[in-house]
Image (cartoon, rainbow, N blue to C red):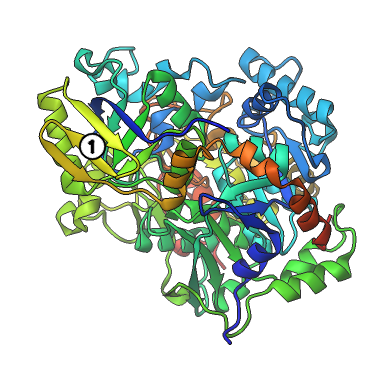
Amino acid sequence: MAGKNLFEKVWNRHKVRTLPSGQDQLFIGLHLIHEVTSPQAFGMLKDKNLTVRYPSRTFATADHIIPTDVISRPLADPLAEKMLKALEISTQEYGIQYFGPESGKQGVIHVVGPEKGLTQPGMTIACGDSHTATHGAFGSIAFGVGTSQVRDILATQTMAISKPKVRRITVNGTMPEGVGAKDLILAIIGRLGVNGGLGYAYEYAGEAIKALGMEERMTLCNMSIEGGARAGYVNPDQITYDWLKGRPYIKNYESMIEYAEEIKSDSDALFDDEVVFNASELKPMVTWGINPGQVVAVDETLPVVESLPEEERETALRAYDYMGFAENEKILGKKIDVVFIGSCTNGRLTDLREAAEIARGGKVAENVTALVVPGSQEVAIAAEKEGLDKIFKEAGFQWRLAGCSMCLAMNSDKLQGRQISASTSNRNFIGRQGSPTGRTLLVSPSMAAAAALAGEIVDIRKTEAVS
Amino acid sequence: MSVLIKEFSGKGITVHGNDIDTDRIIPARFMKCVTFKGLGVYAFNDERVDDNGKSKGHSFDDSKFQSHPVLISNANFGCGSSREHAPQALKDWGIRTLLCESYAEIFAGNCSSLGMPAVTLSKSDIKQLQSLVENAPEIEISINIETMKVKAGVSEWTASMSDAYRNALLDGSWDSTSVLSQAYSEIDRVAGELPYI
């Protein structure tokens, strides 16, 4: 009999029953909440006269609306204050652990969960945020959900969900210098399309994936949703265990490993689909359009609409119109106004190190505003200990407080008018970074830092910083 | 037990384009709220007005489509952010049913949770329906979830949707909390057998 993959094993251990609709009722081992998608869920609980069934399995922080310049209460934005207050009241009322700005443990929920050791192999994890897929880096299966599901999980610790198929994405070879996990996931989305993962969870496997550190695995899994896949994961290994060792919520390290080894994909596991990539062919990637699949390698020219598959042409035309770019143009040398380094995709310590390595000794170009926003207060402290904040500040970058910031611009960090950003975040959607006409080029942390210094998109492989 | 949703009929409103993401349906800055009530006025906000507050002529502002509850759009509708604010904003504006070529997964799940049918038609059928509605905005469209037939005037199309979402509408289990909470003892058993927390 053929072996099982991790997804199947974890799903089966958490399945409560098959519902009459045909969906499964799935137990959620870890539930993460934040201030934007949970207040309405608590409201619904009250309307239905229900309570929180397993409060010790839900953890909260505040990230989306948090200001990154100065936090003093009440927050300057009264609507943001109202949302923060609502989360504080609900978590207190139901006995839910909350990592607020005053705790020294606050940050972007997908940075906080792993760094506290809440995220562990073999868990089912849900959060009212599409980038929950991040936690799959640890060999858990993690889903972004809507507010009605947040309500269901609070009330029952379960949700109704159809079991997706599993596609293995095998990445062979070694990644070249100057190329990282961000480039890999952008290349994957570029090839498979923004809805290529519909109905699938992704298992990332192969030599190049095994060589990635945990932060890079998180970057990779984080953007699974941008390729249409609800979840993405990497099988746990020694790199996973070493990273988690000693973190506050790891109660029993040995039994965690024992369980992780049990739920790993078997060597003869079957998959519903397989795709193979070669890492050695990868280059730094830059998006040029209005979704993350509209992406080219830094030395390529922008695509000719007629040469694209028919179903992509309409969006491509719209993208050219919105971005003000033209077919056959080079992405190299595109002038930028703003640089944003941070987010649940690229706001961790190794991301900041990578960017600081480029920024060291340089100067941010005139007319460019460059923001570095650590993913959590803990990341900020660790970075400051290494002196990364000084490197950034000396080079003319702004060193900010932890939060989601300009990834989706729910605080005051926003693009103005038609500004173009080079951003380490995950979405280049129309209006995403706070200006309804603002434009976003998604890149890796080193490419973003290099763009800040040059004032335009440059090829990181050709700058001196790559040794 | 909640309401069973077997059929729906009403007038149509068209929005053109593939990959219409939830940031476009409801920009993040309008999510500063602790309730979903009143989000409808911000539906498609940045597609409707420019930086100076001037109308761009979006169908949601077109007098001939006002209060029409059947939204007809194209492929990969609702991609991107998981924000339930998106279908909630559409619902608050007055949309009750969606007809598209395809939907992003989380968005389709969110629609199901609201008891809002998100029905799929082929690309050519959508195109035909869009031009039909634009030429005759008052035409009544009926959607039968049991037979998966969509009718407008003399035309009839065969629709599809995932069995799970379809069954949930038909048996009322789209209002999931009550169904899920019928299994507390099984939930506690699964929790007790987990090797963590």
Residue at 49 percent across and 30 percent down: it is: B3
Is residue A71 shown to the viewer in this render? Answer: yes
Residue drawn at x 72%, y 42% is A156
Few, some or many C-alpha atoms within 10 Å of disc 1 (few <14, some 14-19, many ≥20)?
few
Q: Is residue B7 left or right of residue A411?
A: left
Foreground of the two, B177 or A409: B177
A59 on left or right of B38:
right
Residue A266 against residue A162 in the figure, above or below: below
Residue A52 on image: x %, y %: 77, 35
The number of callouts visible is 1
Task: Specify whether residue A396 is in view.
Answer: no
Task: Indicate the quadrant where residue B117 lies.
Answer: top left
Rendered residue at 47%/27% (across/down): B88
Q: Which residue does the image show at 37% across and 20% down from the upper left?
A: B94
Outermost residue to the right? A252
Amino acid type, label 1: Asp
Residue with the most extreme bottom position:
A1
Q: Residue A399 location in percent, x, y?
A: 66, 36
Which is more toward the observer, A15 or B14? A15
Q: Quadrant of residue A86?
A: top right
> In the rendered image, which residue does mark 1 sit on?
A321
| Vertical comparison of B34 with A121: above or below | above
Above-or-below relation of A5 to A378: below
Pinpoint residue B159: horizontal percent, then vertical percent: 27, 46
Q: Quadrant of the N terminus of chain A?
A: bottom right
| A269 left or right of A109 in image | left
Q: Quadrant of residue A54?
A: top right
Q: Position of residue A297 (x, y in %)?
A: 36, 61
Local SS, label 1: helix
Where's the C terminus of chain A, which quadrant? bottom right
Above or below: residue A263 compared with residue B38: below
